[in-house]
Amino acid sequence: CQLRNTDYAYGLVVSTGADCKINYIPEGGRPRGEKPSLTATLVNKDIALVTVVLVLTCLVGAAGATAWDASSSPWYLGEDPFAHVDTSLRTRTLDFITAAGRFFLLTYQFIPVSLYVSISVVNTINAYFVTQDRGLYDESQDEPGRVRSMALLEALGSVSHVFSDKTGT
């Protein structure tokens, strides 16, 4: 075991036996998948909130448009050319659905789809910088730093303690 790029490290050995994480399987019988990074979790929560705001905006706009259309005809059009058209509940429901679709098409840009692409590009650039960093180069094995998980790169700046078992995981 080699200690690189730091002056000292504290260590504590704890043996948990069969209760360790590698042996843990939850009650459902399936082991847990990869834990998303903090950035991914926050972005997902924000996009869920924006989606709720988008749906509410579409519903309020559709209700307002349907109510506006159901009122008297605009003064600048003169006589109502559609006075003979049936304004039953079925027609109003279709008008509401059409207006909701129209408002969705006008406001769907609320959801930043390109945000995920931007985060992936930033992670790729960060991975490149890690592989090119001379401070992470191991001369004895002639091996540069490697990035095996983008989620670890995002959390790297917030590491204050490192816990490891005897295998180094």
Image (cartoon, rainbow, N blue to C red):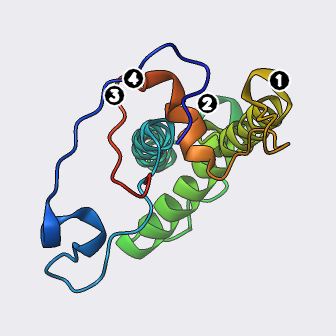
Q: Relative to residue 71, is residue 83 drawn left or right?
A: right
Q: Label 2 vs label 1: CA separation?
A: 75 Å
Q: Amino acid at mark 4?
A: Ala
Q: Amino acid at mark 3?
A: His
**Callout 4 crowding tier (Cα within 10 Å): few <14, some 14–19, many ≥20:** few
The residue under label 4 is: 9
Look at the numbered disc 4 and give the secondary structure of its residue.
Answer: loop
Q: Label 4 vs label 2: CA separation?
A: 81 Å
Q: Amino acid at mark 2?
A: Trp
Q: Nearer the viewer, mark 2 or mark 1?
A: 1
Residue 122 in which image quadrant: top right
Residue 79 visible in the snapshot: no
Q: Relative to residue 19, is residue 70 drawn left or right?
A: right
- Counting from the top left corner in percent of width and height, residue 27 is at 13, 80
Of the image marks 3 and 4, the number of the one nearer the N terminus:
4
Look at the numbered disc 3 and give the secondary structure of its residue.
Answer: loop
Q: Nearer the viewer, mark 1 or mark 4?
A: 4
Residue sitting at x 31%, y 24%: 10
The residue under label 3 is: 161
Of the image marks 2 and 1, the number of the one nearer the N terminus:
2
The residue under label 2 is: 75
Q: Label 1 vs label 3: CA separation?
A: 24 Å
